[in-house]
Amino acid sequence: MDGPRIKIAITIFLLSAILAPVAYPQEMRKTIVVFSAFNANNPAIRIVIEGARHELSEENYNIVVEPLDFARFPENDHVRRIVTLYNEKQKVTPADLLVLFGPLVFKELKSNGLKILDNTPTIIIDNEGMSGDSVHAPLSENQIRFNLEYNCNKTLQTAFELFPHNKDVYVISGVAGIDNYFTELVRKETRYFNETHNFIYVSGISMDSTLRFVDRIPRNSIVLVTNYQMDINMISYSTPEVIFIVDQHSKAPVFMLPETFGVNKGGVGGYVFSYYEVGKETGRIAKQILKGTPIKDITVNKDRFYRYAYDWQELKKWGLVNSRLIPGDSIFYNEPFLLKYKKYALGMSLFLGAIIMLVVYLIGRNKRLKMLGERILETEKMYRELIREDRMAKMTELTASLSHELNQPLTAILFSAQAGKRFLQSGKLDQAQAGQILDNIIEDDKRAGGIISSVRSLMKLEHREKEKIDLNEAIRETADIFYNDAVRQKIKLVIKCDPERAYVLADKIQLQQVLMNFIRNAEIAMEKTDPANKKLEVISVVGKDFVTVSVRDSGPGIDSAIKEKIFEPFVTTRKGGTGIGLALSRSIIESHNGTIWAENMPDGGADFSFRLNLLKNG
Amino acid sequence: MGDPVVYIIDDDSSVRKAISLFLSAIGYNVQAFSSSEEFLDQEPWEGTGCIILDVNLEGKTGLELQDHLIKLGCNLPIIFISGRGNIQMSVSTLRKGAVNFLEKPFDDNELVSSVADAVQLSQKLLTEKNEFINASALISTLTARETEILSLLISGKLNKQIASDLNIAEQTVKLHRHSICEKLGVRSLPGLVRIADKAGIKPTGKIQ
């Protein structure tokens, strides 16, 4: 062996000796699997995970999310399928820690046999209000649970303190289960404020109608968006986006319950719930568990879940920046950069620096505003598109149902006539039979005519003349018509009109048609009710800007199968019902710029209501 | 065979009444029902006829009733009528043996010819069914050995071949064959083939 070869060999040996430590043995990466009750884009779970990542940033971990999306897949098979799939996945990447986020997740996974649930440390974030008693189910020693409790009282209180002159509160929400849950929370709290504030609930309508409604909310009101996951047309939304859009439409300040849903995105802020803090707390617990702390030694700290947080820009818009009502420890979003460094901008050099910062800030702000503008345009375009599609689908559906409805009497008429003809040909047509056949034809023809005229009336409503009428008077007149009917059917008819005059600009005949429709439906609904309990109430309540009229019965309530679409044409549970009455009522009320809704009352029976704008200076 | 009966099942009383009247004007014996359940409550009809069945019934729908009747082995042909059907639906019902799929409002001639076709089909089905019953009754009088020889015979085998297949004397085969013909009341091989076919007896062995 000669010299150079040995040198090369030595060099290679030395190099490999130097390089070897670089390829240090890889540490085992921990896997955290999060099962969420919602879909992958749900803002709450996204923010919770963001918070958890913040806390775990130093650790070597990997977070995987398995969305269960209960809203879209309510059937029980769905969870079983996911569990089956997950039991397979688990063999490839085992989980070191489970996080179960949202109502019923623990209960569902447990009952559907998720294997790793028994022997993997698990953090359960649940909610008693939505999961019921299952949040008290006993846990094994490697499971820890904390329930999220929402407190709307203080949120409302901050809103009322900041805007002491705004007395009308518009509570906006979608129709998904979780939307209703949050709205009910607010409804429960309102008993503390009923004396001082009017609460108007805007729910059970499409996003399109919601925004049109928001457009008309006066400046001196308060808008509260509780949760908006789905509208009545079953279109999904995300609550932060809805708050953003609602704020674009609203002249009044917009509030929300969780911080991260709205502060920073159009909402004013206040004492709000922070999913980010929930995430951080989850991350903190996860860290302890992964480091081997026994679960029984871990305590959950929920103190920071609620905090004061405001959008600085919104405060400025309402002239509240220096309000003594804003606590010092509040968190501010969108706070101008410059403001924070005011104290230090004393010296000349700092002044110069501040100028540079100002320029940078202005450029950034300009860009942001431009982007914001584009985003608004884009979203509005999207909404218009959605609304258009929505209408097209409705038209197609209407046409299909209409042709079906008409085909029945047309077929019957044809065959009655043909039967008559054949009897005539065979010489077997007697007078009685001829009469019967003609009667049938007349009846079916009338039925077809009725369908056509009701559809026509649905479409033609806008062109009627409106005049100033007292709605209370219209109610009394309508009730008079039903008085005898009610006595005969042993129904206790109660009319509770507000003593205030209820002047509205309306077509009286049409409104009476709506009332008659409500009352007749109520009567029919109570056909099988024990006469001792038959009660029909017609109530009017005159508020500051609105009058609300409700017709309540003590029948079995609205069938949940059709509750969502009860105002759509041809929807009925009644044998022989056309399903036009309520659709027509909705068209009438909407042509009066009012809102109409139906709900089941807590102690049984149905409530059909509509609300109209009062005539100013009436 | 008795007079055919036309059953009409439709939850729309106007349509039900009008079609019933029309078909009785033509001379059919008509029975009307407002739901599948009401129809199924009746004693099953053994004679000929057909069912005019609305697709969109409350409770058990027309499509479900068709499946149910197929399971029950009901021989009545079905004519579907529908206010809002689609092609897919009609194809699937026809594939399952429906005679026709008529969309409301349909022409009276369409209904008349469909009902006539359906009734004719039901007569054919009933004849076949009766023949099967008769033939099976005759076949059931044969002994196991005779049935075995019958299926070899109808596959075209000669006495000699059968004898060697079964490892018996040719004379014995002849005796069995004579007895089979006697029991089934036929004189020739074609006669045996016909009865075996109706009773669903399959030939065994290679056909020559």
Image (cartoon, coloured by chain):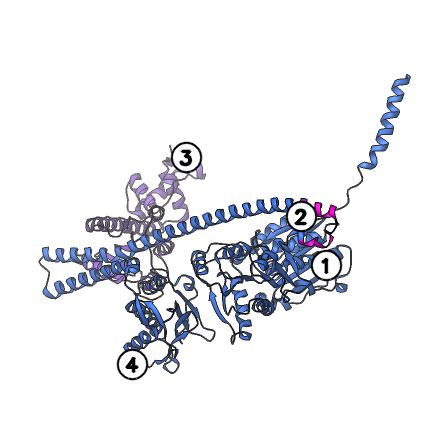
Chain colours: A blue, B purple
Mark 2 vs mark 4, CA separation in Å: 71 Å
Q: Position of residue A151 (x, y in %)?
A: 60, 68
Crowd band around label 3 with a 10 angstrom C-alpha radius: few (<14), some (14–19), many (20+): few
The reply to the same-chain question for discs 1 and 3 is: no
The reply to the same-chain question for discs 4 and 3 is: no
Outermost residue toward the left in this view = A427
| Residue mark closest to the camera, 2 vs 3 | 2
Quadrant occupied by the N terminus of chain A: top right
Amino acid type indicated by mark 2? Lys
Which residue was labeled with disc 4? Answer: A488
User: Which badge, 2 or 4, is on the more N-terminal residue?
Assistant: 2
Amino acid type indicated by mark 1? Ile
| Residue mark closest to the camera, 2 vs 4 | 4
A22 w.r.t. A93: above or below: above
Mark 2 vs mark 3, CA separation in Å: 55 Å
Task: Specify the principal SS of the magenta part.
Answer: helix
A568 w.r.t. A359: above or below: below
Q: Quadrant of residue A449?
A: bottom left
Which residue was labeled with disc 1? Answer: A285
Q: Which residues are magenta?
A: A339-355
Mark 2 vs mark 1, CA separation in Å: 25 Å
Which residue was labeled with disc 2? Answer: A91
Which residue was labeled with disc 3? Answer: B206
| Residue mark closest to the camera, 2 vs 1 | 1
**SS category of the residue bearing label 3:** loop
